[in-house]
Image (cartoon, grey):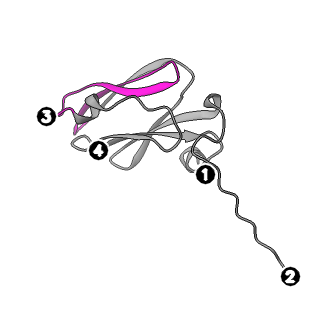
């Protein structure tokens, strides 16, 4: 008799060095950054612009030209599953584990 086994990791599973910052614009993969490598990135689309900073194991949107700047006011994210969304610009940044299927689907 075949036995299926499901294993669920906690949101903290995997080390911070394995974490990636996955960025999508209008639902389309835009870029993937390593969470433990400090970098800055400007996203400019037909919807507007956002400035993303990854520093000290955290990611955040430091500037945006959207009207309410809710994304700019959001606390930095650092744990798997956390997201920052800029609705007017259709930008989503999310922390994922480097071994996740979402990373695999973006690289294909």
Residue occupying the far left of the picture: 67
Q: Overall secondary structure of the magenta stretch?
A: strand
Distance of label 3 from label 1 (alpha carbons):
34 Å
Q: Which residue is mark 4?
A: 90
**Of circles 4 and 3, which is in front?**
3
Q: Secondary structure at mark 1?
A: helix
Where disc 3 sits, the SS reads: loop
Quickly name the residue at label 1: 101
**Magenta-colored span:** 45-69
C-alpha distance separating marks 1 and 2? 28 Å
Q: Which mark is residue 48?
A: none
Measure how far apart labels 2 and 3 are at the Cα level.
59 Å
Taking 9 as reference, is 91 above or below it? above
Q: Earlier in the sequence, mark 1 or mark 2?
A: 2
* Residue topped by disc 2: 1
Q: Is residue 22 magenta?
A: no
Measured as percent of width and height from the top left, residue 3 is found at: 81, 74
Q: Do the numbered discs 1 and 4 sit on residues whose CB atoms are within 8 Å?
A: no
Element type where label 2 sits in the image: loop
C-alpha separation, residue under disc 1 versus residue under disc 4: 22 Å
- Give the CA distance from mark 2 to mark 4: 47 Å
């Amino acid at each position: 008799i075949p036995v299926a086994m499901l294993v669920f990791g906690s949101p903290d599973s995997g080390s911070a060095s394995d974490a990636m910052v996955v960025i999508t614009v209008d639902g389309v993969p835009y870029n993937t950054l390593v969470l433990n490598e400090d970098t800055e990135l400007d996203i400019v689309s037909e919807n507007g612009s956002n400035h993303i900073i990854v520093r000290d194991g955290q990611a955040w949107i430091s500037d945006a030209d959207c009207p309410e700047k809710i994304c700019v006011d959001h606390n930095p994210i650092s744990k798997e599953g956390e997201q920052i969304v800029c609705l007017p610009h259709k930008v989503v940044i999310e922390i994922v584990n480097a071994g996740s299927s979402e990373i695999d689907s973006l690289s294909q």
